[in-house]
Amino acid sequence: MSRIYELIEGLCPEGVEYRIVDRAVDVIAGPRGVKRQNYSEGTMIPIVDQGQSRIAGYTDNSSLSLPEGEYIVFGDHTRAVKWVDFAFAPGADGTKILSAKCDFLPKFVFYCLANLKISDRGYNRHWTILRELLIPVPPYEVQREIVGILDKFTQLEAELEAELEAELEARRIQYAYYWEALLCPREGWRKTTVGEVAQVFDGPHATPKKTRTGPWYLSISSLKNGHFDFEKSARLSDEELPKWTRRVSPRRGDTLFSYETRLGQAALWDVDEPAALGRRMGLGSRGRCNT
């Protein structure tokens, strides 16, 4: 960052000019009505529209494509801002194709538009609003330095996401392996029921009045991939807790599960906090009954 400050101090000591977006880009009137095809059908030209995905499909109609260049694709209704540096066919209405004017580096304008914050407009990036917003116009050397730094961070982010996804996939494979190795039936195993290995209780068949604070009220939405999602869990008052735990209350080591709607969802209650079961929630416990 010190390099950028040095450039600004040396090249524009009086400050950086600002310009509205409409005077920083030209809007290209590209063709519309592109028919999407599957890539396997021999199509070669990618379609870029206002959706969140970078490529929306393919076409083999070369007359509908723009030549290879440096473009900014803006979604009028989706707020998506994309960098496109290859030949492509523009998508349907609402897709704005922007080209930077001569005193801007195209990639610099892309980063400016992608990072604009429009808090007083509800983050609506509709072109009629976006075109009137201001972006800086530093000298080329400063723009080039900024683009270089942001490109490096973008590449690093992509590499980290790829590494994380690879790690997650390895963990999924490992989980599936151990699930099968440890829990799949083997010779000498016998089938049994939940009631034979644990005491089973169900919660009340009604819903209490929910509160902002107090003991947990655990419903089906509380269960998520073998764990409790406390952000999706409700609460009830301390005064109401005895009423809703007359039948049973969760204790550390109990297994809570759904017996309707989301069958197969279960989680271990491993905290010492007061809680009540919700509707369609069951509880499995080893060797105790509620008191």
Image: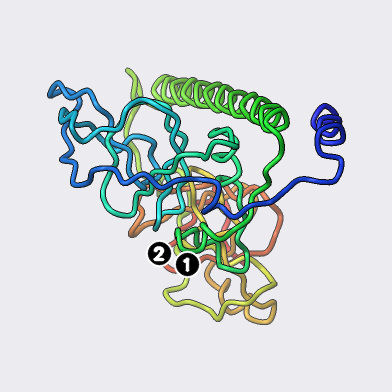
| Count of numbered labels shown in the rendering | 2
Q: Position of residue 233 (x, y in %)?
A: 56, 62
Gap in angstroms between the C-alphas marked 1 and 2: 7 Å
Residue tagged 1: 203
Q: Nearer the viewer, residue 125 or 137?
A: 137
Q: Position of residue 188 (x, y in %)?
A: 34, 20
Amino acid type of disc 2? Arg
The crowd level at tag 1 (other Cα within 10 Å; few <14, some 14-19, many 20+) is many
Q: Residue at x 81, y 35 (%)?
A: 8
Q: Is residue 17 above or below residue 188?
A: below
* Label 2 secondary element: loop
Q: Nearer the viewer, residue 36 or 248?
A: 36
Residue tagged 2: 280
Mark 1 touches mark 2? (CB < 8 Å): yes
Q: Position of residue 130 (x, y in %)?
A: 52, 58
Q: Position of residue 104 (x, y in %)?
A: 59, 37
